[in-house]
Image (spheres, coloured by chain):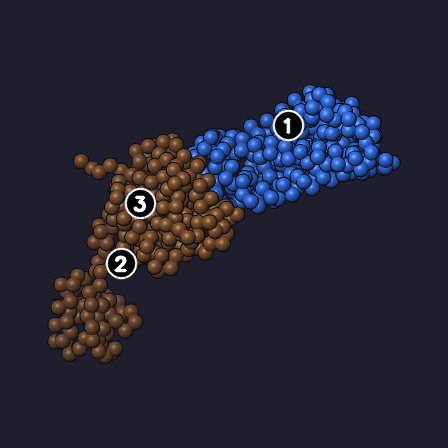
Amino acid sequence: MSSPLALDVADLSKKYGKRMALSHANFEVPMGSICGFVGPNGSGKTTTIRMLLGLITPTTGSGHVLGESITHPEKYLPRVGAMIEGPAFYPALTGLQNLTVLAKLGGFDVKSIQGLLDLVDLGDRGNSKYKTYSLGMKQRLGIAAALLPNPKLLVLDEPTNGLDPAGIQEVRNLLRKLADAGTTVFVSSHLLSEIEMISDHLVMLRLGKVIFSGKTSELLAKQQPVIVAVPEKVGDLEKLAQIAKSAGHDCKIIDNALHVSGSSDYSAKLNKAAFDAGIILESLTPVKASLEDTFFEMTGE
Amino acid sequence: MWNVFQAELVKLRRASLSLSTIAAVTFVTGLVTSLLFLLVDSPQGNGERGVRISRDVLALPSGASLSFSNSAGLLGIVALCIFAAQTAQEYTYGTLRNLLVRQPSRMKILLGKLGSMKLFAIAMVTLSATLAISLSYLLAGVKDISTSAWSTADARSALLRGFINVLLATIGYGIFGMILGLLFRSPISAISIGVIWNLIIEGLLSVFVKNIDRYFPGQLLSTVAVGGTDKISYQYALITSYSFLLGGLAVVAFLFKKRDVAN
């Protein structure tokens, strides 16, 4: 039996005038997973998120959030936390007052606010006006606001924008903790290394179309690993490339190193062949394809 | 809707808005009351648009609440600015999307906002009435105007009528501001268009085009505030102005419900 779905989108499209912002998107996000939502700027990520949250109406197609149709956002939004297009709050109100506005609006317990401020490390700045916050603090307040409903699904649009490395790590740990506790996290980010580290699932967009949807491990497994060979003498690079090509491996020279497509099994064979040809290798490193490499390859960016 | 109402009150209670509103109401009421009493003998007039209000009229039971009724136009402008800003700021700050995620029913958002701002208007009008009456007693003493009729049952009845009329006018101006806020989605545009329309365009056109003031919301609301004039009856002013406003509100509510929230 398949696991229940937190998000399920079928043939979803949004057209603005003649421009197709999202075209016939299909993807599923299992409950309890962390799903990375990636794509170049203008690929339709925010449009998709807006439709999932009932802010804009799809041109065609359908979608379900926590089992409810996106045509009735009132049925699922009380269980959804969201930060869309960065944090947006009232500058003249304090962090605490801003969260109070949202807590009262959603009918949530205002007593939980201080705990949330502590959680995002704003416990001692809750009474400062929002306009005095740094970008990182604003971002953290946005995350606290998204957590107000104790959500079953958390939708975050670029949550690590403006955060320092320590802040990014804290957000990463927080998202992992929430997912372990059963919250589904749907997170868009341009920091692909971050997404790779935390996400179990991926939805990848390009020019308004879904080009991959599935497990992150499956996507990365599809990518050919690379062996990076650095000869002691730069002049041996061409000779080394001929050896790899004659063994049926694609290769290219990048910055005084030969990048050979192939699994780590080929490393030993390449080393021996190079030695037999009188080439001494300074280093020979098998490298697994990263999400970033995969992303650039798939999006053609 | 109750949740929206409560959430909106958190925003309306903020110190900067409360203090600036108190300052504006105090200034407007103080100015109109002072001019009414201190210029009572001036040949240039002491009322709105140079109208002369004599000592005898000020000594009537309605005298205590007269300055308050005369402040309604300017109080209305204050309300227009507040209602417009409170509505349009959701677009400029990008906070509308947060509100709609927490309360997807756009009509509830609109009605909750309107309800909370009406309460704010009641507070404004109550403050203005208190200031106007206190200052009237003070200035009547300075200008030797009799106040013996101001504590009669007729005076209390006139004050109650005046309060209701000024409140209706102030809320009407506020709704006008809210309509502009929803239409233009920018506080600066909504406020400047609202103020220019009410203070300049309506006034100028009323001078040049005969009887056109019978169809202008600002002019009609001013008439409501003073309980009707010789030219326009109270009933006509109330029904016509609120018909315009409710019609306008229905149109912008429809747009608000249907429009994509893309910022």
Pointers 2 and 1 within a single chain: no
Q: Is residue A192 visible in this depiction of the protein?
A: no
What element does badge 1 sit on? helix
Q: x, y (%) of residue A101? A: 46, 40
Quadrant housing the N terminus of chain A: top left
Residue A126 or B112: which is nearer the viewer?
A126
What element does badge 2 sit on? loop
Which residue is denoted by mark 3 in the rendering?
A: A185
Name the image quarter holding residue A236: bottom left
Pointers 2 and 3 within a single chain: yes
* Residue at the image position 29 percent from the left and 59 percent from the top: A293
When the figure is inspected, residue A45 is found, relative to residue B37, above or below; the finding is below
Q: Chain of mark 2?
A: A
Q: x, y (%) of residue A217? A: 22, 51
The residue carrying pointer 2 sits among few (fewer than 14), some (14 to 19) or many (20 or more) residues within 10 Å by Cα, namely some
Q: Kindly report which numbered mark, 1 or 3, lies closer to the viewer in this rendering.
A: 1
* Residue at the image position 26 percent from the left and 67 percent from the top: A252
Name the image quarter holding residue A151: top left
Residue B95 or B141: which is nearer the viewer?
B141
